[in-house]
Amino acid sequence: MPNKRKITVAHGNGIGPEIMGATLHILQEAKVPLEIEEVEIGEDVYKAGVPTGIEGKTWESLYRTKVFLKAPITTPQGGGYRSLNVTIRKTLGLYANVRPCLSYHPYIETKHPKMNLVIVRENEEDLYSGIEYRQTQEMFQSLKLLSRKGSSKIIRYAFEYARQNNRKKVTCFTKDNIMKVADGMFHNIFEEIAKEYSDIENEHWIVDIGMAKVADSPEQFDVIVLPNLYGDILSDIAAQITGSVGLAGSANIGGEYAMFEAIHGSAPRRAGQNLANPSGLLLAAVQMLVHLNFDEEATKIQNAWLRTLEDGIHTYDIYKEGVSHKKVGTKEFGEAIVERFGQSPKKLEPVSYKKTQSASLKIKEPSKEKKELVGIDVYIDEVTDSVESLVQKLKKVEIKKLKLNSLSSRGLNFWPGEEPLADKSDHWRCRFFSESKKTAKQDVIDLMLRLLKEDMDVIKTENLYDFNGKPGYSKASSN
Ligand code: NAD
């Protein structure tokens, strides 16, 4: 008997303990050599006063085993509770969220019988840093942060995943027609990395039309890589249109750690009734077995699961008169899978996981570019309906080395130009540039002191840098 592989397991809340019970029973019957360290997370831990829902001893277990099989948890109502998932992903550096979404037609009803795609969502960056500010009476701000390294890592992961799993195409979604700097960087890195994978087709779509295409004809997609927020939205759409949210599992992968879970929540109304479908968590556990190189066991379990679906043994959420053969509970569904060990589906595509040497991601350290301070954007809180009078005020404070270049509000340029001001605004971006393109930090401080003297309410400043001579900031107006 080989040494057992330690994993950390949380039974979660709501339907969590039931679907985890069925999943662990299947793993045990398949004789996977696992040693389980059980931990408690979620509702009771939150209520005991731990704002992240996860205790120190749980972290110790995770640092020891490096692999986490997690059932869904319930976030208690009311404020003050931090997202457990975001905390785990960031603390363990789980940068890739991998979510296969496929349909099981004709055994599970779906409008998209040929759908078989995998979403690779960036998991650590974007708007999920949760850095937010209220700046004026009117204006609220969320910071979207994307890094070159984080973007390279997820995009390279998507291409490596495609290669290892015999996938033919990687599609990238961004909104770089609007967010030319941040999403533009993600798109550029995608184009660069794609060149290294000439065996894999690549394409890019603007995220809105891309998502519409997925909802309409998902069979056109294979692997989709995208930044965090777009990935969050798309993965629920994609899972839902396969037939049921109860069917999809997901893997959260990092350099050292990994976490596996169903995509759905704890469905409290279904809890304690032996009703819930354990398939999402079971498929996540199969992803975990592949990650741990238990390929044979992963193949055996998933093929028996597919055969169970084909035989019409269905839980309530996928049961359909005329298609299904027998409606079963969580436990009986698990038993039906165990009874089918060694069998494969007859019509659905069987799986065959083969030992793969998981490629270590070679992330090139991005080259350092020459960074030059060329100006500053000063955001001010000033209620005015006269652009002209505001320009006059700002002209008074400009210094020789930092001249007023433009005035805009919410990305719309009002000066120079004749753009009419539709409404009173209290949120202005005043762009000051150096004519010689050479600005010193002292110039910025001098300008700030003059603004202060004129009693202008500066709410924020952003230095404007060129990188290798190219602007590292968006133009004064976007549309
Ligand atoms: P949910 O996914 O728990 O349930 C939505 C509906 O989907 C349920 O009412 C049920 O009809 C169905 N459903 C979900 N899983 C099912 C399954 N396995 N079998 C059969 N039917 C299933 O979403 P919700 O109601 O918005 O959230 C409930 C709780 O779960 C909340 O506290 C939320 O914060 C939490 N949640 C946790 C996670 C997680 O731990 N990863 C993820 C999402 C939501």
Image (tube, rainbow, N blue to C red):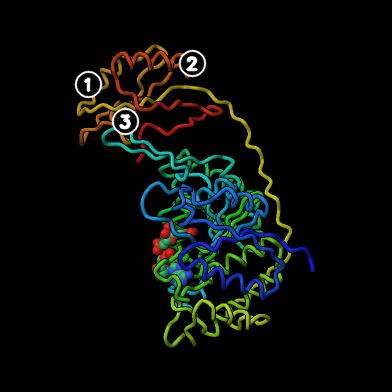
Q: CA distance from mark 2 to mark 1?
A: 28 Å
Residue 180 drawn above or below residue 224: above
- Counting from the top left corner in percent of width and height, residue 359 is at 71, 54
Q: How many marks?
A: 3
Q: Residue at x 58, y 80 (%)?
A: 335
Q: Residue at x 29, y 15 (%)?
A: 454
Residue 370 drawn above or below residue 238: above
Q: CA distance from mark 1 to mark 3?
A: 14 Å
- Counting from the top left corner in percent of width and height, residue 382 is at 26, 26
- Counting from the top left corner in percent of width and height, residue 68 is at 61, 57
Pointers 2 and 3 in contact (CB under 8 A)? no
- Is the CB atom of the residue marked by disc 2 within 8 angstroms of ligand 1's nearest atom? no
Residue 66 seen in the current view: yes
Q: Which residue is mark 1?
A: 389
What kind of residue is marked 1? Ser
Q: Which residue is mark 3?
A: 408
What kind of residue is marked 2? Ala
Pointers 2 and 1 in contact (CB under 8 A)? no
